[in-house]
């Protein structure tokens, strides 16, 4: 998860520090992180909390400096101890995930609380969920609901989703599908895929809302288009049966193919079964659509300021590393596309529904990045 730099707020900065901060911010906005670092590092060392936080972000993301989670934690802590809520939230995330520090839920909860008490919706949401699960704090549904409501009322999508989940499960409140649907909808309308999927399920089953398969398909599609595998599977089912959408085996195959590429075995089964009912032309079209969508997702996942794909031996080395991380066997990670590397590439391409070439290409690099990112979600 990439951390976000603190927005420019010249009203809070005194010259000449304000000019230095502004120059760093302008450089970061155009992707010149080395210059941003040179501008911000002296300010951070002088005790400027916003600059300390931004230097932490740069170490966290590896922007302009080598990625270093421990160094990110060091700078986040400096800013957090000065009361900067964004830094307190980021420090809590590091403790929760065990990045740069030993994992410590109690310490995560302590820093979440500091940020939450300053009104950070994201911190309120995460603190509420920790109370719901008993992570680092004593499990307490009432306390969970308190913080989730604060986050949800601020418009935090994750807080809205999790508050909906508590109503859906009847945790600390009477079970209430209508109230669950209300909060799921708020998060879904902000583009939150988990909420879109949950709302679609309620429409499909007629719980808390009038049963409406057309509306269910609409929300499944929104989540599916974001790469949500279970939504892709359910949308494939609806196209296969013609429920809520016109029956269309090409669309069913495409969505099941996409879900299967993420490791969903039941989607692989559905895809292979529907393929038996399709003509060669339909099957070819379904595979083409799935390839185009996966490549589009891979390209969207790379931000405009991301570094370009590596080339030459570095490209092969990176592809080998990604294949190994995803459970394939590329042989030695040496930047040489030998027989084992080509075999691993062919296996990945075959399982993902792509033309099987065995070639280490920039397009393959993008697709492996997308699969690796999806695995961590």
Image (tube, rainbow, N blue to C red):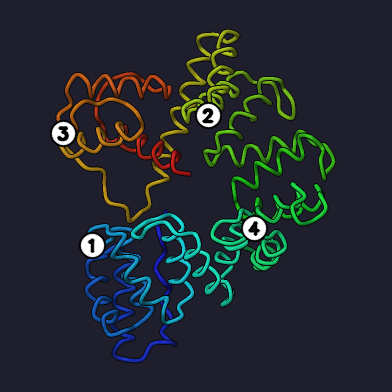
Depth-wise, is mark 1 or mark 4 nearer the camera? Answer: 4
Q: Give the CA separation, mark 3 to mark 4.
A: 49 Å
**Residue furthest out toward the bottom:** 15
Q: Give the CA separation, mark 1 to mark 4.
A: 40 Å
Q: Position of residue 267 (x, y in %)?
A: 56, 23
Query: Considering the numbered disc 3 on the image, is that residue within a helix, a strand or a loop?
Result: loop
Query: Closer to the camera, 309 or 119?
Result: 119
Residue at position x 43%, y 71% in the image: 87
Q: Give the CA separation, mark 2 to mark 4.
A: 35 Å
Query: Considering the numbered disc 2 on the image, is that residue within a helix, a strand or a loop?
Result: helix
Q: Give the CA separation, mark 2 to mark 1.
A: 36 Å
Q: Earlier in the sequence, mark 1 or mark 4?
A: 1
Label number found at residue 259: 2
Depth-wise, is mark 2 or mark 4 nearer the camera? Answer: 4
Read off the residue under disc 3.
Answer: 335
Read off the residue under disc 1.
Answer: 65
- Left or right of 372, for residue 319: left
**Residue furthest out toward the front:** 138
């Amino acid at each position: 998860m990439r951390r976000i730099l603190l927005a420019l707020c010249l009203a809070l900065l005194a010259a000449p520090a304000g000019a230095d901060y502004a120059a760093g911010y302008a450089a970061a906005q155009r992707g010149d992180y080395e210059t941003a670092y040179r501008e911000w590092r002296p300010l951070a060392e002088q005790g400027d909390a916003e600059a300390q936080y931004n230097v932490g972000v740069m170490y966290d993301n590896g922007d302009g400096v080598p990625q270093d989670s421990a160094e990110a934690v060091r700078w986040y802590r400096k800013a957090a101890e000065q009361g900067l809520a964004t830094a307190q939230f980021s420090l809590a995330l590091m403790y929760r995930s065990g990045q740069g520090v030993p994992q410590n839920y109690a310490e995560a909860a302590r820093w979440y609380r500091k940020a939450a008490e300053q009104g950070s919706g994201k911190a309120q949401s995460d603190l509420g969920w920790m109370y719901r699960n008993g992570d680092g704090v004593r499990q307490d549904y009432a306390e969970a609901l308190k913080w989730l409501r604060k986050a949800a009322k601020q418009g935090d999508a994750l807080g809205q989703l999790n508050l909906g989940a508590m109503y859906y499960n009847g945790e600390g409140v009477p079970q209430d599908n209508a109230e669950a649907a209300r909060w799921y909808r708020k998060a879904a309308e902000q583009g939150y895929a988990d909420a879109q999927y949950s709302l679609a399920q309620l429409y499909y089953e007629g719980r808390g809302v009038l049963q409406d398969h057309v509306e269910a398909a609409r929300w499944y599609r929104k989540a599916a288009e974001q790469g949500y595998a279970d939504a892709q599977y359910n949308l494939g089912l609806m196209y296969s049966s013609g429920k809520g959408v016109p029956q269309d085996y090409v669309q069913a195959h495409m969505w099941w193919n996409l879900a299967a590429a993420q490791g969903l075995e039941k989607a692989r089964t559905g895809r292979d079964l529907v393929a038996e009912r399709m003509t060669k032309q339909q099957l070819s079209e379904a595979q083409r659509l799935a390839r185009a969508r996966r490549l589009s997702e891979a390209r969207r996942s790379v931000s405009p300021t991301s570094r370009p794909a590596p080339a030459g031996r570095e490209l092969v080395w990176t592809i080998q590393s990604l294949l190994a991380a995803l459970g394939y066997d590329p042989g030695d990670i040496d930047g040489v596309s030998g027989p084992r590397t080509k075999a691993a590439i062919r296996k990945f391409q075959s399982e993902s529904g792509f033309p099987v070439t065995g070639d280490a290409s920039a397009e393959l690099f993008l697709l492996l990045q997308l699969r690796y990112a999806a695995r961590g979600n």
